Structures are given as C-alpha cells and as structure tokens.
Amino acid sequence: MKKDMTSGKVWKLILLFTLPIMAGSLLQQLYNTVDGIVVGNFIGEDAFAGVGTCGTLGFLFLAFAMGLGVGVGVIVSQYYGARKMKELGAAIDTSLILMGIFGIVFAVAGYASTPYMLRVVLNTPENILPYGILYFRIYCVGIVFQFIYNGISFVLRGMGDSKATLYFLLVTTVLNGLLAVLFVMVFHWGVAGTAIATVIAQVVCAGISYIYLRRRFKFEDTGKHFDAAICRHILRLGIPSAIQQTIVSFGNTAMQRLVNGFGESAIAAYTAGTRINMLMFVPIFGFQAGLASFTGQNIGAGKLDRVKSGFRATLIMAISISVAASTVTYIFAPDIVTIFGLGGDALALGVQQVQFFTVVFCAFTFYMVVGAVLQGAGDVVVLSIATLSALAIRVALGYLGVHFGILGYEAAWVTNPIGWIASILITTLRYGSGKWKAKAVVSIPPDTKPSEEIRAICEGNE
C-alpha cells in the first residue's frame, strides 16, 4: 500500500520502506549473477568472459532508464506529498509513455551497434567476441520492457509503495533462473539460452507491474494521458540524471576496455568481481532510494526538519550495514568468487578486486546517502557534477597508470575511492549550504502551515 512518510518515527519509516527495495535490488542483481553462474559452470570461461564484457553495455541502457526514472520519482513523490492527485495521475501516464519511447529508441540503437561497440569500443578479444554479440543482440529485444518496468518502479516508490516491486522481481528472478537452466542444460542453447531467459523475464516483469499499478491505484482523471508541462518537468529533472548515469556507464565501458587489454583471465575476474561488488552495493542503493523518496515527500509537505533527521538516521544505518557486509565479504571472498567457476589467475585476480572494495566501501556509502537528499530535493545538477567528477578522476588515473606502467589490471578498480573522495566533498558542501532546499518542484499544501521561509522556498519554484 502507499506509505505516507511525512509523519511518524523517521528511522523506522525509512528502514521499513527501504527493506523491500533492498530485497528487490538483490533480486535484480541475481538476474546477472544467475546467468554468470550458469554460463561459467556449464558453457565455459570464454563464454563467461564474452557475456561479461557485455555487462557495461547492458548497464549503459539501464543507467539511462534509471536516470530518467529519477525525474519520474521526484515528480511523483512531491505531487503525492502535496496531495495533488489530478497532477499525479497525469504524471504517471506521461512518465510511462516517455519511458516506452526512450526504450524503443535504445533497443533499436543497441541491436544495430552491438558488433561495433564490442569490437571497436570495448576491444573485445576475437575468441570471445561471438559470444558477446549473440548474447547482447538478444538482450536488446527486452530493453523497452526494462525501461517501462523502471518507470513503474519509480512511480510506486515515489508514492511509498516499495513492496510491490519486490514481489514482481521475486517472480521474474525465479523465472529467469529456471529458464536459464532449462535453456542451457536441457535445450543446449548455450549463451543464447541465457539471453532469451532474461528477455522473457523482463517482459513478464513489465507486464505484471503495469497490471498491478492500474488495478491497485485509482487516480483522478484529468482527461489527458500525456501532459506536455509535466513531461518538461520530468525531462528537466530526469535528463541531467540520465546523462550523468549514461556518462558514468561510458566510463565503466572505458574501464572494461582497459581490462579487455589484459586477456580472458582478467575479463573473467573483473566480471565476477564486479558482480560480487554490485551485490554489496544493494543495501546502499536501497537506502539511497528510500531516503530520496522520504526527502521528496517531506519537501512536498514543507517539513524540511524531517529531511535532516532522515539523513542522520539513514547514514547511521547504512554505515553499520556496510561495515558488516565488508567484513563478511572480505573473509569469504575466495569461496564466493569460486562460485562462478573460475580458477588459476582469474580466481586470484577476482579475489584481489573483491577484497580491495571491502576496505574502501564505507566511503561509497557516505557519498550515496548525501546524494540521496539532493536527489529527493530535485537538486540533480550538483549531484551530476559530483558523479561526473568521480568518473573523470577514475578514468584518467586508470589510463595514465597503465600507460606509464604504474598500474596493471588493478587500475580498473583501485582508482574508485579517489573519485569518491571528490564526490563526497562536492555533495557534502552542497548539503551543508542548504541550497538544495530551493529545488522543490511543487508548492506545499496550505494546511501544513509552514514557516514563511519554507513557503517562500517552495512556492518560488511553481
């Protein structure tokens, strides 16, 4: 059901809202993890490396969808917090139409450019290139459904419904795993089988989430399914985040190219290490999404004091979980990496990468929590600057390190914490300045009786 986060115990509201998001994010990560385990153990290390080198391309499209979804989430959460139900209904229809259009464009572009992206941009070794092209071209068929699902997900989170997406992902992740095993082990479809399983799961996920949204929630009909003014608001907030996420994805693509130059063992190790690290990121991404929605609703209601309380509570919870997750992962890293069927040099490199991330993980956690406040407030430009600064530092140091012989394969990941430090400085200074308070999209409802300062801030953005 919809959750109103403008009243009640702050830490409890955020935690209860965040837990389903964490579980849902975990299930999303298991999509790729299950594929990797099946491919690595039943097809081979070359196939695993070939599919793995497509990971950054897949993230490129997902990143744009999630970036655009930020605009959707900000609009929906603030309209919901302000109780503007007519505008809310129009915003939801507009959002899904917009996401569908972008999804179609990216699906066509991705399918057409796959060989070029893998061969030229990523410099994929020839012996694993056919695996990558086959896998990713099939994967592109499901991109439009991925966009639509992410739009629905941000809509539901903006209204405080974080549990529904968990149930959708639970069903589709189990379906993806079962189909991957069936298509690879029984039908012997190889890499194509894992890609087809993923596409079917994406179609099912988008379908059931759309049916749920329409049947569960009733919105006041404005007579418009596409509102140009609301579309401009979504694009104004979403495009900077989408561009930010896309550029970050290109940065990851640049680092993947760097790794590809070190051969198949390095590619396989980087793929396994990255997927394990992404599982560690799950609770932090959950807290970010939860705090962003909490911030949006409370800004919409004119309760800025609760935003600061939410930041402090979330930071304590997120850091505590990060320390626990890092400790466990560091200890069991060799056993975890082995699950992907790796051995020898690939196993050793993968363990090295995973253990390094556990040591520096809390810095990433702090950055994400501060950024969640800016995201929920709609202060996306500064957040984009922070993220892009981290990326530029990482890529520049990585390539320079390899060029001058200072770094080897590890350049792809040891440069991360240096970039995070720059992001932390930018976002923390912005949060401390309080200027994010002036970024509200909607005016606060009159019955909240906020201070004149808060009313001026919010109404000045109408």
Image (cartoon, rainbow, N blue to C red):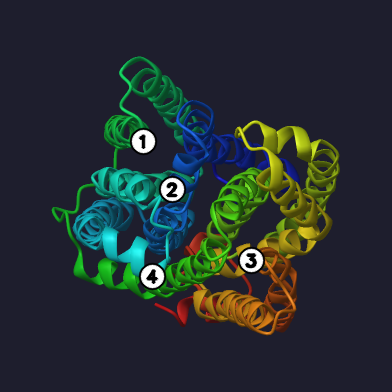
Disc 3 crowd, CA 10 A, few/some/many (<14, 14-19, 20+): many
**What residue would you read off at disc 3?**
412
- Asked if the residue at tag 2 contacts the one at tag 1, i.e. Cβ–Cβ closer than 8 Å, the answer is yes
Q: Secondary structure at mark 2?
A: helix
Give whichever of 434, 251 is nearer the camera.
Answer: 251
Q: Earlier in the sequence, mark 2 or mark 4?
A: 2
Q: Secondary structure at mark 3?
A: helix
The amino acid type, in three-letter code, at marker 1 is: Val
Q: CA distance from mark 1 to mark 3?
A: 26 Å
Give whichever of 293, 146 is nearer the camera.
Answer: 146
Q: Earlier in the sequence, mark 1 or mark 4?
A: 4
Q: CA distance from mark 2 to mark 4?
A: 14 Å
- Residue at 58 percent across and 58 percent down: it is 292
**What residue would you read off at disc 4?**
121
**What residue would you read off at disc 2?**
50
**What residue would you read off at disc 1?**
191
Give whichever of 378, 257 is nearer the camera.
Answer: 257
The quadrant in which residue 230 appears is: bottom left
Q: CA distance from mark 4 to mark 3?
A: 16 Å
Residue 61, which numbered label? Answer: none
Q: Inspect this view and state whether residue 154 appears.
A: yes
Q: Earlier in the sequence, mark 2 or mark 3?
A: 2
